[in-house]
Structures are given as C-alpha cells and as structure tokens.
Amino acid sequence: MEKREIQIKAKDEDLKGVYANAMVVSHTKEEFCLDFLLVNFNPPILVSRIITSPAHLKRIIEALSENLKKYEEKFGKVEPSKEVEIPIGFRPK
C-alpha cells in the first residue's frame, strides 16, 4: 500500500487540544459514543465527544494498541492506574 501525505485543516483552538482524565463509552447497534471528561471539578466537565461507527472504532483501538506498544518499547511498561468509581450522570438544567 502506497503511503500518501494528506493535509489536515484545523482551527488554531483545536490544535491546542483538550485534557481529559476520564472517558465514558456508550453505544447503539450503529455507533459508539466516546465522552471525554475532566473530573477535577464537581460536576465533571465534558471536554469532547466523539461519535463513530463500530468499524472505525475497531481501527482506532488497533492504532492505539500499536502506538502504546511502540511507546512501551521506547519508554518502558505503562501500569494502568487504579480504577476509580466516579458516579457520572447527566442532569437537565
């Protein structure tokens, strides 16, 4: 497969990125919803939501796994942090 270069258009604000320290995953038959949260506040703040197809989610997981493997080869094994039970819910205003 020939690699080709693509140019990505992005707003300056999007290039800064956002920090998230938690994620909630939900799904229907047709799509997955990944909600990235900042839980340093009460209530937690939704910083980004990604909605994608199951097939594309599978490619995302493969890309993340491949890159984590490369990271660990270079910097050492990453130990998962302890799971923290955070009651998360959405309330109407």
Image: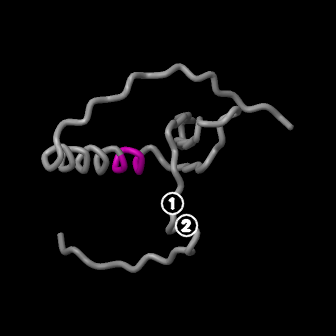
Label 2 environment density (alpha carbons within 10 Å; few <14, some 14–19, many ≥20): few
- Furthest residue to the right? 93
Residue 14 higher or lower than 76, as above or below: below
Q: CA distance from mark 2 to mark 1?
A: 6 Å
The percent coordinates of residue 71 (x first, y second) are 21, 48
- Left-right relation of 18 to 77: right
Q: Are marks 2 and 1 in contact (CB under 8 Å)?
A: yes
Color encoding of the figure: one colour
Q: Residue at x 59, y 50 (%)?
A: 48
Residue at label 1? Answer: 17
Which corner quadrant holds the C terminus? top right
Which of 17 and 9 lies nearest the eye of the viewer?
A: 17
Is 11 contained in the magenta span? no
Residue 5 higher or lower than 61, as above or below: below
Label 2 SS:
helix
| Residues in magenta, as a range | 55-60
**Which residue type does callout 1 highlight?**
Gly
Residue at label 2? Answer: 14
Which corner quadrant holds the N terminus? bottom left
